[in-house]
């Protein structure tokens, strides 16, 4: 079905802002702070930075190369370069998109609800009880469905007039919000303790494989890698773009927002003395501790908290859009569906799959471990082997189109061949072990 009429970004910053919109999301704030808290702060942040550069960047460029070169959605892109044998691995990407968006939308639903509550009623004093009441059950499912409706609506509008338009309008807003919040928290008494916790590295923990696994999974999740989201966005890209430059721009923006979000979250938490709650509920950390802090701040807390939640909603929306676009563009290319029906049918199916995550936090945590960690790491491994070994020199040629630097690309190919796969194999092993342990715990 793909032919000369494939949609394209309208140019300028359209693609870049959409890709940054995909990368910047709940991963940067909710997942990053919950992972950092669970893994002891600084050591995690340190490994996350290292893995973003050593593994994230090369895989991002691999996705950009496959997408732009083939001008096809993930399954067809693998088949285009590798032949039919690769089809099942492409299907794995689409499956990951299904699982991740299903629970991602539930969490997004919480943020929409908090944002609306901040505007209408403020943050309740008993944040823990409130979170317990809204995180699972029918109201959680209802907000999840509302959110999926919004996402499907934007995706049904297409690339330039749907996704690009929303990203160009909202991403600058998100940047301003996050920077403004970071500036505000520097004025709080006791913020220093938070910066210290966040930025101090205990190098003994860097050697822990559990921390390594979480840092790698987080790097993939946050950069939207390992399931063809960046690949899909790049498939709407013209041949005039410099791919290494785009990869660097997107990765740097994503890291910047994650880092600055940490400069908002940890000082807030420490300044208001609610740090004890972080380790008590890691998955809900952001949604319990921060609202508690906002409630204690009185009137200004409502404003600051409302803006924080608004930033979260913006990030969540532009990320969810990219997750759905992977599935939708696969249905358009592979099944010949029209965009509009693909958007609503796929969006509807994912909404259904999200119902269990909306009913139980255990189910949500399990989907995050399997979709958000295991499948992404596996996908990243497949991508690095595919581009590094199967495409090999051909990938260099595609990378040079649009002005990629030869020496940089050579280094990239070397990383894809010899550095990324062994690191990901180790990570995959630990991820498999933890996924198995979670499944056993949940079903026994
Ligand atoms: N990167 C987004 C975030 O940090 C989530 C996301 C969007 C994603 N698209 C993805 C994660 C594709 C993995 C794969 O919130």
Image (cartoon, grey):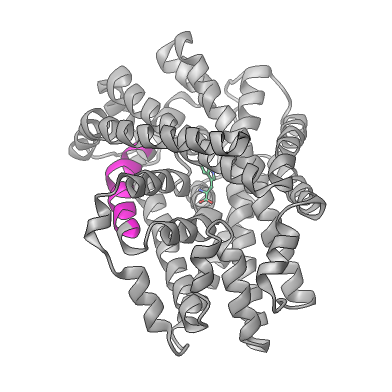
Residue at the (66%, 25%) spot, across then down: 332
Which residue is at the front of the view, 420 or 75? 420
Which residue is at the front of the view, 228 or 3? 228
Left or right of 406? Residue 234 is right
Residue 103 x/y as whole percent: 64, 44
Which residue is at the front of the view, 123 or 250? 123
Q: Quick check: is 54 in the magenta stretch?
A: yes
Magenta-colored span: 44-59
Split into 4 quadrants, where in the image is the N terminus? top right
Can you name the residue that lies furthest to the left here?
Answer: 407
- Is any atom of residue 256 visible in this view? yes
- Is any atom of residue 7 visible in this view? no
Residue 386 falls in which quadrant of the image? top left
Residue 102 x/y as whole percent: 66, 40
For the stretch drawn in magenta, the main secondary structure is helix
Residue 286 x/y as whole percent: 56, 65
Left or right of 152? Residue 245 is left
Can you name the residue that lies furthest to the top here?
Answer: 84
Residue at the (57%, 23%) spot, across then down: 4
């Amino acid at each position: 079905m793909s032919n000369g009429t494939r949609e394209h970004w309208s140019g300028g910053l359209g693609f870049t802002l959409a890709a940054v919109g995909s990368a910047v999301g709940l991963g940067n704030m909710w997942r990053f702070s919950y992972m950092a808290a669970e893994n002891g702060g600084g050591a995690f942040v340190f490994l996350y930075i290292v893995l973003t550069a050593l593994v994230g960047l090369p895989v991002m460029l691999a996705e950009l190369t496959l997408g732009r070169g083939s001008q096809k959605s993930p399954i067809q892109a693998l088949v285009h370069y590798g032949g039919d044998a690769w089809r099942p691995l492409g299907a794995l990407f689409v499956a990951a998109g299904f699982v991740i968006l299903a629970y991602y939308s539930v969490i997004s639903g919480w943020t929409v609800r908090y944002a609306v509550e901040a505007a209408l009623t403020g943050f309740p004093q008993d944040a823990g009880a409130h979170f317990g009441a809204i995180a699972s059950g029918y109201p959680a499912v209802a907000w999840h469905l509302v959110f999926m409706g919004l996402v499907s609506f934007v995706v049904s509008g297409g690339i330039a007039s749907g996704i690009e338009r929303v990203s160009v309008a909202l991403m600058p807003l998100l940047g301003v919000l996050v920077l403004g919040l970071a500036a505000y928290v520097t004025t709080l008494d006791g913020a220093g303790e938070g910066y210290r916790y966040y930025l101090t590295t205990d190098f003994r923990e860097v050697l822990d494989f559990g921390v390594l696994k979480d840092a790698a999974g987080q790097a993939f999740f946050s950069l939207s890698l390992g399931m063809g989201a960046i690949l899909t966005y790049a498939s709407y890209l013209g041949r005039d773009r410099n791919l290494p430059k785009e990869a660097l721009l997107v990765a740097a923006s994503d890291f910047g927002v994650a880092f600055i979000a940490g400069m908002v979250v940890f000082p807030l938490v420490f300044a208001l003395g609610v740090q004890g709650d972080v380790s008590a509920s890691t998955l809900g950390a952001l949604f319990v501790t921060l609202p508690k802090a906002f409630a204690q701040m009185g009137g200004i807390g409502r404003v600051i908290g409302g803006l924080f939640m608004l930033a979260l909603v913006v990030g969540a929306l532009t990320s969810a859009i990219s997750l759905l676009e992977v599935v939708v563009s696969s249905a358009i290319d592979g099944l010949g569906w029209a965009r509009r029906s693909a958007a609503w049918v796929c969006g509807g199916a994912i909404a259904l799959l999200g119902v269990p995550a909306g009913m139980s936090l255990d189910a949500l945590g399990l989907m995050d471990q399997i979709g958000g960690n295991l499948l992404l790491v596996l996908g990243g491994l497949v991508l690095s082997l595919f581009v590094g070994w199967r495409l090999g020199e051909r990938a260099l040629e595609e990378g040079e189109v649009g002005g990629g630097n030869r020496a940089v690309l050579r280094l990239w190919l070397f990383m894809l061949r010899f550095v990324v796969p062994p690191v990901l194999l180790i990570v995959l092993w630990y991820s498999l072990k933890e996924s198995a342990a979670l499944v056993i715990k949940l079903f026994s």
